[in-house]
Amino acid sequence: MKLRKVKINKYKSFLTAQEVTIEDKITTLVGKNESGKTAFLEALAKVNYFQKDSKFQFDETFDYPKNEWKKFQKGDEDVEVIRCSYELSDDLIKAIEKDLGSGVFKTKEISYGVSYRSNGTWDGVQSNEKKLIENLLAKYELPPELKTEFKKAMTFTELATQVQANSQAATELLSRINEIKKDAYEWDNILNGYIAKHYLRPNLPKFWYFDEYYRLPTQININKLHEGNNPSLSEEELKISKSLFELANINIEELLKTDDFESFISELEATSNEITDQIFEYWSTNQNLEIKFDIETKIVPQNRQERILNIRVRNKKHRVSLPLRNRSRGFIWFFSFIVWFSKIQSAGTKNFILLLDEPGLNLHASAQADLLRFIEEKLANDYQVIYTTHSPFMIESANLARVRTIYDSTDSKIGSTISDVIQEKDPDTLFPLQAALGYDIAQNLYISKNNLLVEGPADLLFLSTLSNILESENRIGLKENITIVPVGGLDKVATFISLLRASNLNIFCLLDSFKNQKGRQKLEDLVKQKIIKEKNIRFYHEFVTTSNGQAEIEDLFEKTEYLDMFNKAFEEYTDIKIEDLDKSITNIVNQINKAINKEHFNHYRPAYKLVQMGVDASYFAEDTLTRFEIMFKEINQYF
């Protein structure tokens, strides 16, 4: 079965009924701390947990919203806390049809709900009793007069009554009817009860839950593990420790009786190799590690022996091993996750839904990317996965449609609310999604190996436009394999160079003249540290002559050209003429600032206006075109 929808109500912070659609493979729940993400996963797990566990059973005392608990406690009404809607697989429907015949089971989708004070209830189970009667009568040999009589039955119950009255003449049919009745829920509609109990309940997906508390300890006291009494370990640590021995196929009782550990160590080593291979297929942070197990005997008071399993991690590069606790929290989490996940891998069925609460919380961003790849490639191909996160690195920006946001409303009567990304309005809740999208844009912006860093978007538009115009005249423009990257200001140039250098990209800077020493110093420091070569940094003043030796890209145009762009872009100002400019000021931008009596104007608007105007080479003076062409030639030559 595939989980399609979940409706949750009156569970911890969920005060009103909330419905969420579930994706075929991966559903991501995003929200702030204490928004209700964990509560949602817990409620799901309690529907049908994969093993017997008191922690994953509904308890109205602890689970019902506290501000309404007293009223509920005193009342007689029950509340359905969660309802899961499922789509049945074709194989399951075929199995039902093989048993009951075609045309009996009439639905593809069913739902199962759990209440605080009553057993689980089914909805959507529909069957054609008349068709079943027809199929049964066609299957079993009966006297013609009985067949004619039995065909008059309208329900399975009526048929059962008639067959019972003629038991000696219809023994085989009666036996089949009794089988169905015996293996059915005590519903008014016995056939529906049989389908639900015999086919739907056994195939209801089991939920498997994992959070950061399921962490393998460095040492496992095997005696105490066997006795179920180890106060130094949490309940989760005890469970995952037992899973390790189950995974290694080791009988703890036999291990405690023997002094020869070789066969057990051999089993553990085989398990270690299997786990190591799985880990390092998706752990790119450090490929030189391997898991080592060791069993030792300790003498404790009263001369009693205790067996201890030590878990160590060996660094093959440095040839040293350390206890598991000395590795990073992220590595311990990933190792523990593989052990716990291996428990269901060995179950022989894929009828599980995986619930991961804040997976990879302690992992570095690149390791979170590895984990996301593990979820995509390893888990989601076989299981539905629902995981919570508030990390942008655990959100696939190309698949935002599978994201659901959870927000704890400021209205005390509403509580946690679930919505899709489009409906969410809370900025804090949306922040991880915005960060993920921004990171993705940043990663994909630099699609070229060759990057020309400029100050802002105005430079990008001017350079692109002039390059296209020159090429249309069969002159030299900027090569197509060069990507112009606006960095958002001179003060950010140094940071961008450092970031792009880490991706082994070719970098060339084309910048305004520095007006302050701070920016110049940052760039000079990068040159001294050999992060960028001095020849890779060029300034606009190198391509145009000005009286003060400084220039911005606007100074590469003739003043009349740029004034025309400015006047058309800024209709709110009276048109500025050449004679309006202060000749004691050199640069055109500063001259305009004085003319409009402002410290600065939006440089982007004249550049955008130029693009809108759709001009050709005739709009520009030959000196302008030549300046840009010489500049493009030098940039091309570098790359």
Image (cartoon, rainbow, N blue to C red):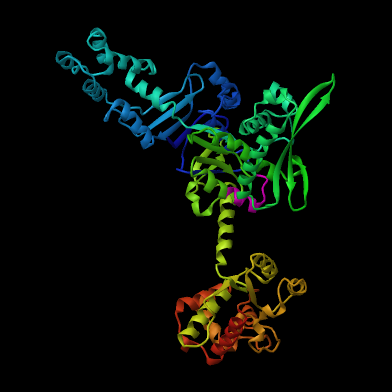
Which region is colored magenta? 361-372
Residue drawn where x is 70% and y is 26% of the image? 255
Residue drawn where x is 69% and y is 80% of the image? 535
Q: Is 449 situated above or below 49?
A: below
Can residue 254 be seen here?
yes
Numbered-mark total: 0
For residue 371: magenta?
yes
- The x and y percentages for residue 601 are 60, 73
Give the main secondary structure, helix, strand or loop, of the magenta stretch: helix
Residue 216, image quadrant: top right
Q: Quadrant of the N terminus?
A: top left
Q: Is 365 situated above or below 544?
A: above
Could you say which is closer to the camera, residue 350 or residue 314?
314
Q: Is residue 41 left or right of residue 91?
A: right
For residue 393: magenta?
no
Q: Is residue 331 left or right of residue 603?
A: right
Residue drawn where x is 47% and y is 49% of the image? 401
Residue 266, image quadrant: top right
Could you say which is closer to the camera, residue 403 or residue 25?
25
- The x and y percentages for residue 131 are 24, 25
- The x and y percentages for residue 529 are 77, 71
Q: Residue furthest bottom?
A: 622
- The x and y percentages for residue 403 are 51, 46
Residue drawn where x is 21% and y is 23% of the image? 138
